[in-house]
Image (cartoon, rainbow, N blue to C red):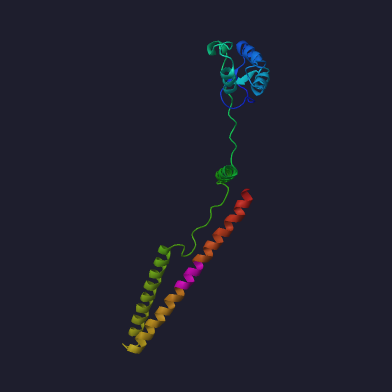
Amino acid sequence: MSSDHTNPPGLVVSTTEPILSFLTSASTDPHLSQELQQIASNLSSKPNVPYKSLRALWLASNASTRPQLVQLFSGSEFVLTSPKPREKSEELKARLQKLAEILERNAYAELVKDITPKKETNEPFSSYKDQLGFGLHVVVTMFTGYLVGYAAFRALFNHSPVMNAAGGILGLVVSMLVETLIFIIRSSSQDLRSSSSTPKLKKNQ
């Protein structure tokens, strides 16, 4: 079997000697209309002919002079036409392009992951758990400072209620100041570590 991209749609057969002889005689057959004669004349010069047109000519021809169908199609082959390639829609093209860009970015990230610094996520109070832990820590520290100050002033001022309360408040204030100082020192050390990692990376590159 052969393939021809220019064949008309529908079932197509290859032109053989019996088919060519029939078309030649049909082009001058007085029993056929001028339109059918013209179709037969045009098809006689083609390497392949549509089965539908050939059958129409055969049915319209004189039954006493036309060949048998078995004889007419003897040695003929079906001609298969290759389907036209489907064109990708614009939406599909855009999606494929976007997917290709994502894959390219992932491949690049995988390639440079060893030389790219990791993003620092250890920020102060970066999660609910950190906030809750810091709050409990501050409360415990303030309560401890109050008890220490209260006990110290009670021993110094001979069980005076006013001075004992003042000592507790003083201890609370001192514990808050100490906690604030510790927080500032921790935040500063984290900033220094993150800033020092950048020059090292540039130096390695």
- Can you see residue 175? yes
Q: In the image, residue 116 lies at what x, y percent?
A: 57, 50
Q: Residue at x 49, y 65 (%)?
A: 186
Residue 128 shown left or right of residue 12 in the figure: left
Res 13 quadrant in image = top right
* Frontmost residue, 163 versus 172: 172
Check the picture and name the quadrant holding the N terminus: top right
Q: Is residue 27 magenta?
A: no
Q: Residue at x 45, y 72 (%)?
A: 179
* Frontmost residue, 194 versus 158: 194
Q: Is residue 95 above or below residue 165?
A: above
Query: In terms of secondary structure, what is the magenta stretch mainly?
Result: helix
Q: Is residue 87 above or below residue 11?
A: below
Residue 140 shown left or right of residue 27 in the figure: left
Q: Which residues are the magenta region?
A: 179-185
Res 107 quadrant in image = top right
Q: How many marks?
A: 0
* Frontmost residue, 64 versus 158: 64
Q: In the image, residue 97 lies at what x, y percent?
A: 59, 43
Q: Is residue 184 magenta?
A: yes
Residue 84 shown left or right of residue 123 in the figure: right
Q: Residue at x 54, y 13 (%)?
A: 69
- Can you see residue 78? no
| Direction front: furthest residue | 31
| Direction left: furthest residue | 159
